[in-house]
Amino acid sequence: MLTEGAVCEGGKSRLNKTGSWRNLRPEVSERCNGCGICELFCPDSAIAIEDKKCVIDYDYCKGCGICAKECPKEAIEMKEERK
Ligand code: SF4
Ligand code: SF4
């Protein structure tokens, strides 16, 4: 339990692999032009732009779907995660 007013140590988010929470999986299509908007909106910093394409780190993507909603090219489709 945290004492009231306590401040947690920073920099811990990389230790928590939020990808295990995911029920929906974002998949990027050929329509992606690498604009980087999805990278800006991803709350888990799970997106990088490499060679002008969106690349998702599924270890950290929790499947919230924000990237799919914000993509102006409709290049990201949320699909059911197969576990
Ligand atoms: S917002 Fe869409 S078009 Fe832009 S990088 Fe992301 S997936 Fe690609
Ligand atoms: S679904 Fe959410 S967590 Fe996963 S890449 Fe898109 S914005 Fe990031």
Image: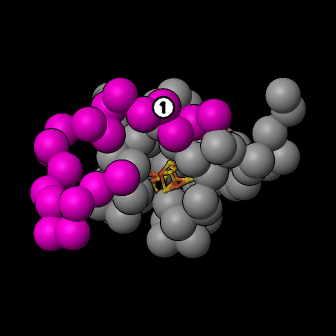
Q: Is residue 2 magenta?
A: yes
Q: Is residue 50 visible?
A: yes
Q: Give the range drawn in magenta.
A: 1-20
Foreground residue among 30 and 6: 6
**Residue 67 locus on image (x, y percent):** 50, 60
Q: Does the magenta stretch include residue 22?
A: no
Q: Residues within 10 Å of mark 1 (few under 14, many from 20)?
A: some
Foreground residue among 82 and 40: 82
Q: Can residue 56 be seen in this view?
A: no
Q: Image quadrant of residue 54?
A: top left
* For residue 10, side relative to residue 74 (left or right): left
Foreground residue among 52 and 62: 62
Q: Image quadrant of residue 49?
A: top left
Identify the image quadrant of the C terminus: top right
Please state which amino acid type lies under the numbered disc 1. Answer: Lys
* For residue 47, side relative to residue 11 (left or right): right
Residue displayed at 21% across by 69% down: 4
Foreground residue among 80 and 4: 4
Q: Name the residue under label 1.
A: 17
**Residue 53 locus on image (x, y percent):** 41, 38
Judge whether 32 appears above or below 68 on screen: above
**Residue 19 locus on image (x, y percent):** 57, 36
Ligand 2 contact, mark 1 (Cβ < 8 Å)? no
Judge whether 27 appears above or below 51 on screen: below
Count of number-bearing discs: 1
* For residue 33, side relative to residue 12 (left or right): right
The secondary structure that most of the magenta stretch takes on is loop
